[in-house]
Amino acid sequence: MTAGPDTQFADGFGAPSTGISRWTDLNGPVRYLDFGGPADGPVIVCVHGLGGSAVNWSAIAPLLTGTCRVLAPDLAGHGLTQSLGRGTDVASNRALLHRFARSVAGGPVILMGNSMGGMISLLEASVAPASVAGLVLLDPALPVVAARPDPVVTAIFALYLTPGLRRVVQNRRRQAPAELVTSILRLCCADTSRVPEDVIARHVEVAVQRAGLPGTEHDFAAAVRSVVRTLGYPHGRAYRRRIATVTCPVLLIHGIEDRLVPVAAARAAARANPAWSVREFPGVGHVPQLEVPRQTADAVLDWLDSAGQRAARAARSPARA
């Protein structure tokens, strides 16, 4: 499929409040959701996490579009963006995000990244500082610290890092799309009942479409290995050094009940980067933008009016208005 930046895709998503589905060509088709917002507002590009997609932002985006323009791509090998020969590792998707921000957003942007998306956003701010006006990090994948690992999370990552075992389990049981979405939300949320039903339905719709795409398990496994490699020895040291070079305004939000990235990692990053603004959410898990979208949106908007004002001004380029 070849598509331009304004091509709409008939995937059942069309209402502006839930995002208009569009495609752009970045060395291959890339799907993204355009949630709208004022043309002269600061541009926020939302970067989903491992195994996620643009619909991960469908609860919070409408709460931001009163003042901000909000876009959310599906990274390569995620959502409806097939890899088609492109890498699904962290470095490859960092490069894809860079091209997306330049060609679709058209200038410096605020990157709002969750989990792996936070890692990719931090790396983009380090590698291409002129392209990133500011960062909003929601439970980002951060350098490992000494903390008791969650046994379920450990088992899942071990599964994807062991190809033979992964194939055996996949062949024995493949979850239906609705079951898959439910299991992921249970892992990522402290309280799944907080996630709106219509938002869950949108995740299931994407999971149904994704089930028909080839190579999804291979792409996901490659992404998992890349995230673990970036965090682990010896690459973890290089990642820490990259984080230390980030100079744009940063808001770090972290759920205290996060099972995937312990809050201890966020606290260590905050100590190492005292200029960052930090918010901890009690009783919240790994995806605050889904679990407590109003609380998260309020924190983002408050930051844009205070410590993040410089980021808001830079992301509101006169040439784009």
Image (tube, rainbow, N blue to C red):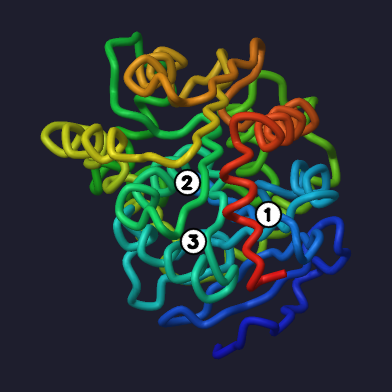
Can you tell which of label 2 and label 1 is closer to the viewer?
Answer: 1
Q: Quadrant of residue 89?
A: bottom left
Residue displayed at 50% across by 45% down: 49
The picture places residue 314, in percent across and down from the top left corner, at 57, 53
Indicate the quadrant containing the C terminus: top left, top right, bottom left or bottom right: bottom right
Q: Which sits earlier in the primary sequence, circle 2 or circle 3? A: 3
The picture places residue 190, in percent across and down from the top left corner, at 65, 19
Indicate the quadrant containing the N terminus: top left, top right, bottom left or bottom right: bottom right
Q: Nearer the viewer, residue 97 or 105?
A: 105
Mark 1 near mark 3, Cβ–Cβ under 8 Å?
no
Q: Quadrant of residue 299?
A: top right
**Residue where numbered disc 2 is placed:** 117
At label 3, the amino acid type is: Leu
Residue displayed at 72% across by 79% down: 9
**Residue where numbered disc 3 is placed:** 75
Is the residue marked by circle 1 packed among few (<14), some (14-19), or many (20+) residues within 10 Å?
Answer: many
Is residue 142 shown left or right of residue 229?
right
**Residue where numbered disc 1 is placed:** 42
Q: Nearer the viewer, residue 132 or 10?
A: 132
Q: Nearer the viewer, residue 113 or 14?
A: 113
Q: Residues under labels 2 and 1: Cα distance?
A: 19 Å
Q: Residue 242, can we see it?
A: yes
Q: Residues under labels 1 and 3: Cα distance?
A: 22 Å
At label 2, the amino acid type is: Gly
The local secondary structure at tag 2 comes to helix
Is the residue marked by circle 3 packed among few (<14), some (14-19), or many (20+) residues within 10 Å?
Answer: many
